[in-house]
Image (tube, coloured by chain):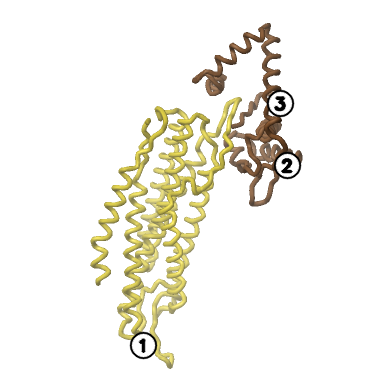
Chain colours: A brown, B yellow
Amino acid sequence: MIEVDVTGPTPPYEQIRAQLAELIACGALAAGARLPPVRQLAADLGLAAGTVARAYKELEQAGYVSGRRGGGTRVLPRSEPGTARTELIRGHARAYLAAVVRLGGSAEEAIAALSEAARPGEGSEQGRRDR
Amino acid sequence: MTILALAVPLVPVVALLAVLTSLRRAVSVPAPADLPVPRVITARLLWARLAGLGIGLAASWSVLSRDDLGRGPMLAAPVLGIGLLLGTLAGELAAPRPHGPIRGASLEIRRARDYLPGFSARLAGALTVVTVLLLSITSVTASADDLGRAGRVLAMTSADGTVRGATGPWPGWFYAWPLLAALAAAFLLSSSVVHRVVRRGRPGLDAVARAVDDVRRAHTARVVTAAYGLCVALPLTGVAVVAAGVLRRQGEFAGWAVPAASGLLGIAVVAAGSAVWYLAELLYRPVVRAS
């Protein structure tokens, strides 16, 4: 699943590109997997088709996917997706900890908040609804 | 006559089967199904479809009352179906787009075959092929009538070119081209609606909203298939019955005419049964229940 904040400073195409690149790098989108058609993803996100098309084009140029006329956009094989996944999770953890510290919190408070958020019914779904 | 005797019990049996199948179709979703966005979509789809049905009925009545040597009654069902398809397309186009500052999308790939009812769609395809083949044959064999209108009668000629008998109305080019044009329009409209059903945005990522949305999409695809099926099945019934009648009257001039008429009556029975099936499909409305 991907999410786009249309009011954020990062352009929507870049948000889509970055999230898909992460999913591919960590192996969540396996080699050979098809990405949704440009128009379908654009309609689901309420964005122009050109926005999604630009994200796909940049992913293709970076070697994450290959697009073929009539064959859709498919994920290309990556080397050691497991290592990339671990690195990505660590990176997100470091960013989260830095945000908590910026607010005057401690590492213990960050872990406690994370444990609370991970409980059933209070995970990301709830977070999305709150926003 | 044997085929007609078989047809009399067959059509009610098909009707009964269709109604029984429809009654069993209650769809379960994971939790309470009364969500605001799917409710809006459902209401818009229903009102647009009813408006399309109203327009289709009015246009169909107008076409029917013109008669036009039998072309009016032949085109009444396709015109009604086209009205319904237009309404369905309008409803799908009016479905609300995802909005709000934060929007999500799953990476699913939706395809037409995920929503189209397999049996009804294949049956509609088969009926279309039969209609096109039948109209091609009747057009090739048709002759001009006594007023010079091309493709209106079936004339039997002897080896020296003498006309031994000419009977009409024969579904030649005079009848074939308006019907084929109406069917082409209905097919294009159906394809547009199914394309829209697959490609329109999801109203939400919540599991219940997705389940309800999938039910609505599948229902629209069912309505489209049924509307298109009626566009084909009803005129095919009429064309086959009329052509069979002409062939029976020409039986004294050609030995193959009577067996061919029996074959055409068989086609008419299948087409009439299909029309009943599609009518039941049109009347079906999915019942969404919380599991």
| Horizontal relation, residue A98 to residue B282: left or right | right
Mark 2: which secondary structure? helix
Where is B209 relative to B16, above or below? above
- Quarter of the picture containing the N terminus of chain B is bottom left
For label 1, the SS is strand
User: What's the amino acid at mark 3?
Assistant: Glu
The image position of residue B263, as x and y in percent, is: 34, 72
Q: From mark 3 to mark 1, how far is it between C-alphas?
A: 90 Å
* Chain letter for mark 3: A
Residue placed at 43% from the left, 66% from the top? B130
Disc nearest the viewer among 2 and 1: 2
Q: Which residue is mark 2?
A: A60
Q: Please give the residue where the numbered disc 1 appears in the rendered image.
A: B164
Question: Who comes first in sequence, dot 3 or dot 2?
Answer: 2
Q: Position of residue A58 (x, y in %)?
A: 74, 38
Residue sticking out furthest to the right: A61
Hey, what amino acid is under mark 2?
Answer: Glu
